Image: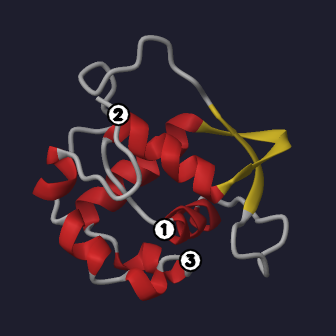
Amino acid sequence: MKYGPGEFSELSVKAGMKEWIESRQDMCDDPKIYDELPHEVKTVLDKWIEASIVPSKKERSSYGIKTDFHRETGIYVYAGVINGALLKAGYQPMNPKDTNWYFKVDVLKRKNLTEKSYRPCPAF
C-alpha cells in the first residue's frame, strides 16, 4: 500500500506518530526534532538509513528521502526528522541554511517492494 503526505498507516498510528506529528508542526524543518522521536520509530529510521542510504555524487533532498522512508515503512515523519537522522549517521547537507536540505546520497531501490516483504526491523 502506498501512503501520501499526511496519511498514516496502521503502523504509524500504533506508534503514536499521528499525534506526535500533529503536535510538532512548528518544528517540521528543524533537525533537532529527530531527538524527540519515539524510541521505536527512531530505531526503525536508523536501521532503514543504515540499510538504504549510500554516498553518491548526485544529490537527494531530505523531502524525497522522507517520502522513500514513508513508502517503504508506512511511517510518516517530517523532513526535519530525516535531516537529524542523516546528520547523526554522518552525512552533511550541501547547504544547511536552505529550508530543504540536499545530501550527496542515494536511496537503494528494492524490487517487488511491499509492506510485508520489507521490514527494516521488527520494532512493532
1 and 3 marks in contact (CB < 8 Å): no
Residue 2's tag is: 2
**Type of residue at label 1?**
Val
Pointer 2 with pointer 3, Cβ within 8 A: no
Q: Residue at x 58, y 48 (%)?
A: 65
Q: Quadrant of residue 42?
A: bottom left
**Dot 3 corresponds to which residue?**
29
The picture places residue 77, in percent across and down from the top left corner, at: 40, 61
Q: Which is more toward the observer, 5 or 99?
A: 5
Question: Please, what is the three-letter code of the amino acid marked with disc 3?
Answer: Asp
- Label 1 belongs to which residue? 81
Task: Tell me the number on the disc at residue 46.
Answer: none
> Which one is nearer the viewer's eye here, 99 or 50?
99
- What amino acid is found at the position of numbered circle 2 in the picture? Lys
Element at badge 3? loop
Q: CA distance from mark 1 to mark 3?
A: 8 Å
